[in-house]
Amino acid sequence: MSHPSTTPPGRPSRDSSLSAARRRRELAGLADGTEVDVLVVGLGATGAGVALDAASRGLTVAAIDAHDLAFGTSRWSSKLIHGGLRYLASGQVDVAHESAVERGILMERTAPHLVGAQPFVLPLTPLVTRSQAALTRAGLSAGDLLRASARTSRSTLPAPRSLSSVETRHMAPALRSAGLRGGLLSWDGRLSDDARLVTAVARTAAAHGARILTRTRALSLDGGGARVRDELTGEETRIRARAVVNAAGVWAGGLIDGIRLCPSRGTHLVLRSEDLGSLTAGLHIPVPGEANRFVLVLPQGDGRVYVGLTDEPVDGDIPDVPEVPETDIGFLLDVLGSALDVSLGRDDVIGAFAGLRPLLDTSGLSGSGSSRTADISRKHAVLTSQEGVVTVVGGKLTTYRRMAQDALDAAVRARGLVAGPCRTAGLPLVGAAAPSGLAALDAPRRLVRRYGTEAPAVHALGLQDPDLARPVVPGHPVTVAELVWAVRHEGALDEGDLLDRRTRIGVVPRDREVALGAAREVLRQEEGRLAPHAP
């Protein structure tokens, strides 16, 4: 039976900053045979969430990933925190309500700096029949009832309403005016950046004493821990643990026998904002011939627009970074072309990315005859192996916290750990504050939306050294100071960490190429700055 750590549950025990030095120190500390209460494998949203849940309950924790924070699916989402309307439409009432509850928790309690309200316009084009429009209006009203049942404030998420044709075109001038009958305005949760959410969760876990260890690959798992390899040095060791949670997403089945997944590919395009006019809202573009399927158009506020997404089954080996097939690009451009006045071709696509959803394979279950991944439930599943390893799969970004809670509850029961109740529904993440507090911060609004209460400290780096205030890429808002902050406090270890996850410069290959020199220089200078003090 486990014994909780001496840190009172719910109270941070140390600094939240992640760094190369801290990683080396904490990994070395585990190599001497120290046993932790919980070992978490995978540092996407769910794995980081398990680490935070366990540490905030007073358990000792090590959380590892073969790559980086948010390296897999968690950085390839639409950046939306959904209220569950899609699941309500398909009869998954429990999943819909869970989504609405978790959306409210993120927006009003744990991460109001990272999650805000996003308006969406669904244009009533000639492709949308009047009966479909009526059904959609009813669905939006049902979604508003979900908001109310989840006790999310009306001030957080305004009510849906109908728009005139003039109002619709004002919010989205690129829409084709011919045949437009107006639009439907709705609101949902929107992340400033999904990878930043994972970073905030991991750092909050670190503040409660969790050891957050990137570049640490699990070679094998069992009920008593894992054999791991430090991917930076090649050294192998064993991490001993009383309980093990496998949160490796689409790679979970490679660590534990008997886990059958049906990965689904979701592809997004990256376009220039100027090519779509001044969008003041996101768009739901109906997919021709589909009754309840839409392509999302999501302005990012940095000169880019994301367009997505697909839902296609993936067979064979799971790559570290999924490739985007031309068929996905063509599909998304065709749907855009069905509703927009502007002509967009392949040359207008400046970037593209795809993520793999770790959906549980239900093909062997009765009544699950559909071969479409779009028809597979997004409800998560928690499975316990004969050796006692707990695996969590399925689900979605919005419900990561609940997935983590259910996984940890299963591990506590299976392994007889002594732990307090889950506290994460009311535990603010690093940088969180009430809207009034965030509004009072003396820092650019863009930084506040990404760093919350830490924004003034990030901004101060540029004020102290003007060279750090310059943009990493001309015309893009990210500054060198943000790269420095990522190395010093957010655990960034290489150029990929800086450009592809702590910032999203890398989703446009040409911008990434321009930014590589600045990223390497920051890493070189920070290594030199800390070298005399390295342990």
Image (cartoon, rainbow, N blue to C red):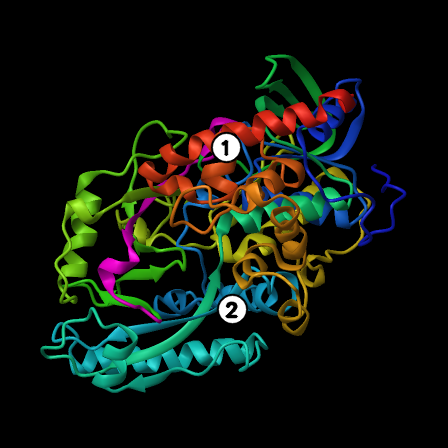
Q: Kindly identify which residue carries mark 1.
A: 519
Position of 348 compared to 269: left or right?
left
Position of 170 compared to 491: left or right?
left
Residue 407 visible to the viewer? no
Q: Looking at the image, which is closer to me, 503 or 420?
A: 503
Is 237 placed above or below 270 here? above
Range drawn in magenta: 251-280
- At numbered mark 2, what does the secondary structure look like: helix, strand or loop? helix
Residue 254 in the magenta stretch? The answer is yes
Indicate which disc, 2 or 1, sits on the residue closer to the N terminus: 2
Residue that appears at 17% across and 43% down: 327
Q: Looking at the image, which is closer to me, 373 or 520?
A: 520
Position of 90 compared to 102: left or right?
left
Residue 111: x and y, percent?
61, 61
Q: In the picture, which quadrant includes the N terminus?
A: top right
Which picture quadrant has residue 357?
A: top left
The local crowd at label 1, few if under 14, some if 14 to 19, many if 20 or more residues have their Cα within 10 Å, is many
Residue 470: x and y, percent?
50, 45
Q: Are marks 2 and 1 in contact (CB under 8 Å)?
A: no
Disc count in the image? 2
Residue 457 in the magenta stretch? The answer is no
Q: Kindly identify which residue carries mark 2.
A: 100
Residue 510: x and y, percent?
31, 37
Is 151 placed above or below 442 here? below
